[in-house]
Image: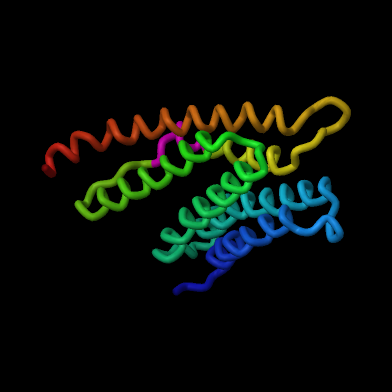
């Protein structure tokens, strides 16, 4: 295992998962409801920023590694899955939204692994990147679950963004599967 700065940031992202989940389920004597939401949103946002930062640093510092390439997407998927499960439990999103997003991640990860085993690859699409941005914007807003300023409701904005993310999730999955079908048919 290569322990460099980018990989340490990725590991910190994984360690942030129990922190933001624990914050949301902490006793009210420790943190008020609004503080739970605020601190959980801050921790998740910080972890999401390290997702960009670890990749940037790996390239700039020339510290890319096979371990980092493996761990980074795992950390992303764990972080998003944990947040979605918590948001379902708190009644802030519908379970079907979480199932769509988590199911797509599992499906595409398995497809990428299989394609790699046969010497093929599927590139990350621009659509997938837009999906990730809308998802990473929606989740902190849904975790925050309060007013932003005098009139913006983070729950409403987050809900629209997570619906957009779910739609883009399905659309990008169809695009990935369409790209993989010819390869699958050749292998059978």
Residue drawn at point x = 75 percent, y = 38 percent: 145
Residue drawn at point x = 52 percent, y = 73 percent: 3
Residue 68, given in percent of the width and then of the height, sits at: 46, 62
Residue drawn at point x = 43 percent, y = 66 percent: 67
The C terminus, quarter of image: top left
- Tell me if residue 139 comes above or below residue 10 in the rendering: above
Residue stretch rendered in magenta on the structure: 124-131
- Tell me if residue 116 comes above or below residue 30 in the rendering: above
User: How many labels, in total?
Assistant: 0
Residue 15, given in percent of the width and then of the height, sits at: 61, 64
Residue 144, given in percent of the width and then of the height, sits at: 75, 42
The N terminus, quarter of image: bottom left
What kind of colouring is applied to the model shown? Answer: rainbow
Apparent side of residue 5 relative to residue 33 in the rendered image (left or right) = left
Residue 97, given in percent of the width and then of the height, sits at: 52, 35
Quadrant for residue 176, please give it: top left
Q: Is residue 127 magenta?
A: yes
- Tell me if residue 85 comes above or below residue 126 in the rendering: below
Q: Is residue 181 magenta?
A: no
What secondary structure predominates along the stretch shown in magenta? helix
Apparent side of residue 6 relative to residue 188 in the rendered image (left or right) = right
Frontmost residue, 59 versus 48? 48
Frontmost residue, 23 versus 41? 23
Apparent side of residue 138 relative to residue 186 in the rendered image (left or right) = right
Residue drawn at point x = 13 percent, y = 44 percent: 187
Frontmost residue, 102 versus 172? 102
């Amino acid at each position: 295992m290569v322990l460099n700065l980018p990989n340490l940031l990725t590991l910190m992202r994984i360690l942030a998962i129990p922190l933001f989940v624990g914050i949301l389920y902490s006793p009210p004597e420790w943190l008020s409801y609004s503080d739970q939401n605020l601190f959980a949103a801050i921790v998740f946002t910080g972890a999401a920023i390290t997702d960009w930062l670890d990749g940037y640093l790996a390239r700039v510092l020339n510290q890319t590694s096979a371990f980092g390439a493996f761990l980074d997407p795992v950390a992303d998927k764990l972080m998003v899955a944990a947040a979605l499960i918590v948001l379902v439990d708190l009644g802030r999103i519908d379970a079907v939204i979480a199932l769509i997003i988590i199911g797509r991640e599992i499906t595409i990860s398995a497809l990428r692994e299989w394609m790699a085993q046969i010497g093929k690859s599927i590139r990350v699409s621009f659509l997938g990147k837009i999906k990730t941005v809308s998802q990473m914007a929606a989740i902190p807003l849904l975790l925050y679950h309060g007013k932003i300023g005098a009139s913006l409701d983070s729950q409403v904005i987050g809900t629209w963004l997570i619906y957009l993310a779910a739609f883009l999730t399905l659309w990008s999955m169809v695009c990935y599967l369409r790209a993989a079908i010819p390869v699958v048919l050749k292998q059978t």
